[in-house]
Image (cartoon, rainbow, N blue to C red):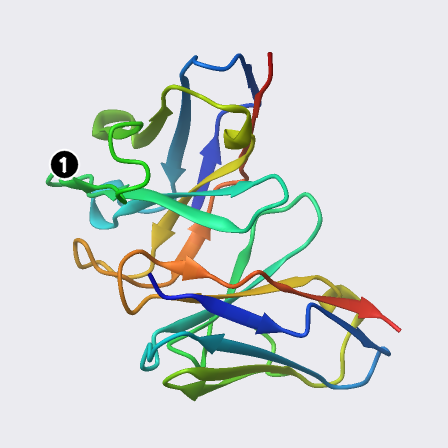
Amino acid sequence: EIVMTQSPATLSVSPGERATLSCRASQSVSSNLAWYQQKPGQAPRLLIYGASTRATGLPARFSGSGSGTEFTLTITSLQSEDFALYYCQQSHKWPPTFGQGTKVEIK
Amino acid sequence: QVQLVQSGAEVKKPGASVKVSCKASGYTFSTYDINWVRQATGQGFEWLGWMNPNSGNAYYPRKFKGRVTISMNTSISTAFMELSSLRPDDTGVYYCVRVRSVVEAALDAFDIWGQGTMVSVSS
């Protein structure tokens, strides 16, 4: 199965600053990459699919990029509600697999 | 409003079975595959399988084949996931999720998630 590796495990950022999260696949997943946000006690929420397409209603400060094995989720001007866990997931080959997550915390 | 609403928390003993339900609303249930994913305590996400409500076709990963059974009752727009021979390391939160694509067996992002069902396995 395809192994997804996220870095860093924890990212400390001040409100209003930019956050850059990375996700690497053990083999090419083309653009079949999604990003999710999860807050404590809640289910994950789809943010990005197809590596760069924002889900309906997602603010423009969230953007995704990359293809093949290297992907990035960028959050410009972090808001208080953006501090959460973020996961990437490949949908290129069965079984779908997830990264271990990056926690974005307040600096 | 499109949503998936799951049944409540369960506490089970090792060797028992658990059956979690997932009721869909706000969309045509038969249009999208339902998958199940779990987040075991201290672990990452694991995919447990999918089923298409229209055809009844299902697929399970090798790790869970024989232990996981997904079923559906389309008359009440509800999916079920049963996990048997429970072990303590099955403890975690179980989610039903809708696949974004309308194509059967499509591997795609999960656009709608149930709220999760906590399953605890302990003697």
At which x and y percent is residue A16?
82, 83
Query: Which one is in front, A59 or B117?
Result: B117
Left or right side of A12 for B108: left
Give the position of the C terminus of chain B as an image quadrant: top right
At which x and y percent is residue A8?
68, 74
Query: Which one is in front, B37 or B84?
Result: B84
Left or right side of A91 for B43: right
User: Dividing the picture into quarters, in which one does residue B10 lie?
Assistant: top right
- From this view, report whether residue A20 is shown above or below residue A97: below
Q: Is residue A56 visible?
A: no
Query: Mark 1: which secondary structure?
Result: loop
Q: Which residue shows up at 25% across the image and 41% down it?
A: B60
At which x and y percent is residue B108?
31, 63
User: Dividing the picture into quarters, in which one does residue A1 lie?
Assistant: bottom left
- From this view, report whether residue B63 is shown above or below residue A1: above
Q: Which residue shows up at 14% across the image and 36% down it?
A: B56
Left or right side of B108 for B9: right
Q: Which residue shows up at 74% across the image and 86% down it?
A: A18
> Could you tell me how many numbered marks the image carries?
1
Instruction: Output the chain of dot 1.
Output: B
Q: Is residue A79 visible?
A: yes
At which x and y percent is residue B40?
55, 40
View extreme (left): residue:
B55
Question: Identity of the amino acid at label 1?
Answer: Gly
Query: Which one is in front, A94 or A79?
Result: A94
- Crowding around mark 1 (Cα neighbors within 10 Å: few <14, some 14 to 19, many 20+) is some
Which residue is under mark 1? B56
Q: Which residue shows up at 54% across the image and 58% down it?
A: A45
